[in-house]
Amino acid sequence: MLHDLVFSVPEKFATGLLDGSIVRYGTLLKDAGTGRILAHVQETGLAQQLLSNIGIHSFTPWGAVASVANLATSGYASAQIHQLRGMLETMQVLQFANVGMAAVGLGVSAVGFAVINRRLNGLKNDVEQFSTRVEHHFQELKDTHWRQRFSSIQVCVGRADRAFQLSEPKAEWIRIEAKLDEESGYLAHSIQDHLGRSHFDVDWFKQLTTSLILCDAVRLRCLVQADELKLARSTASAVGKNYTEMFDSISAIQLADKITRSCKDQDQDELSLFRKHRQHAQLITDDLQEVTDAAISKSLLIEHLIESKVSGSRYLSDIAEHRQHPIVLLTT
């Protein structure tokens, strides 16, 4: 295990989080009075195993997994149900509103490249289904074009997974990160373009955003795996800045208005539709804020690894193999 780093369970800080003496910002726990960083939230391999088994993706509301007891009817093992219930309780202690946050990485992502590729394949299938109902507002979104974009990202992630078999894999991970940087830029441009349009499709926006988050998670994972922690730190900072510029200006009211104007439901008046979409839009903007805060705070986790002189590859290996707790805290 990581002898140079100290891990604890989130419940250690539960009282402080409840009484307000400790606050969470992204994946940081801070002393409310002094602002001192107390701990970094980090998922483990167990978290990713649990979430992957039930198909949790980003932008997944608590309600989708609230009745975990129902999983027993689908053959989910009682031990796994117990672990998943504990994870949900931990996320609530930490005051995360969305379990989907853990699906894209709390701290440095512990999810394997192969698992990310399966998620990307699911997103590609969603995009293909989206193209079957595309209307004139989206005619430029050719099915073959987006299939090529996702295939390009998937090829990179597949190469990252196979790089473990190379005698010198670090250079390969660095090359892959550079290629994914280009793909990330394209996805970010597509998101900004969609936000600027009068017509707005929530499903398409979620697919684009989830793809961007996964792409950036792989970029960061590649650099940490290659032990290029200083570059990983600056990359994490750049990703956080990019998310801030994209998402901070999105208000729930503006988003609800876009969704309402694009809605085909003629059975309700516009005001009723707006009120309904306002709640949905608020959930989306809250999720985007969580994603942005988490992205910003990851650079501080990597800074802590640098100061502690812990290699990135060793850190990733140990958190991936951790099977006792889904979420742990790296205390400072």
Image (spheres, grey):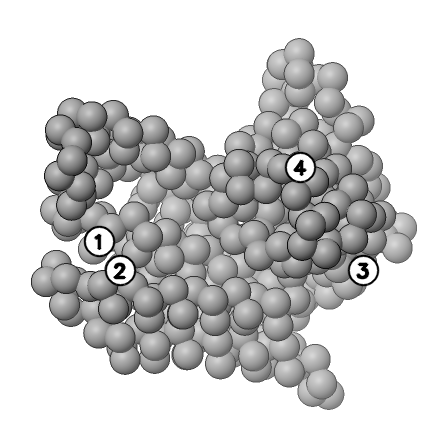
- First-in-chain label (1 vs 3): 1
Residue receiving disc 2: 190
Residue 225, position as x, y percentages in the image:
67, 67
Residue receiving disc 1: 194
Task: Kindly identify the residue that appears in the image at 30 percent across and 56 percent down.
Answer: 204
Q: Amino acid at mark 2?
A: Ser
The quarter of the picture where the N terminus appears is bottom right
Residue receiving disc 4: 88
Residue lying furthest top in this view? 19
Instruction: From this view, report whether residue 16 is shown above or below residue 114.
Output: above
- Secondary structure at numbered mark 2: helix
> Which of the two residues, 313 or 326, is positioned nearer the viewer here?
326
Q: Amino acid at mark 4?
A: Leu
Residue 120, position as x, y percentages in the image:
48, 67
Residue 32, position as x, y percentages in the image:
61, 17
- Secondary structure at numbered mark 3: helix
**Horizontal side of residue 62 vs 111, given as left or right:** left
- First-in-chain label (2 vs 4): 4
Judge whether residue 139 can be spotted in this image. Answer: yes
Judge whether residue 237 can be spotted in this image. Answer: no
Give the number of the mark in front: 2 or 4. 4
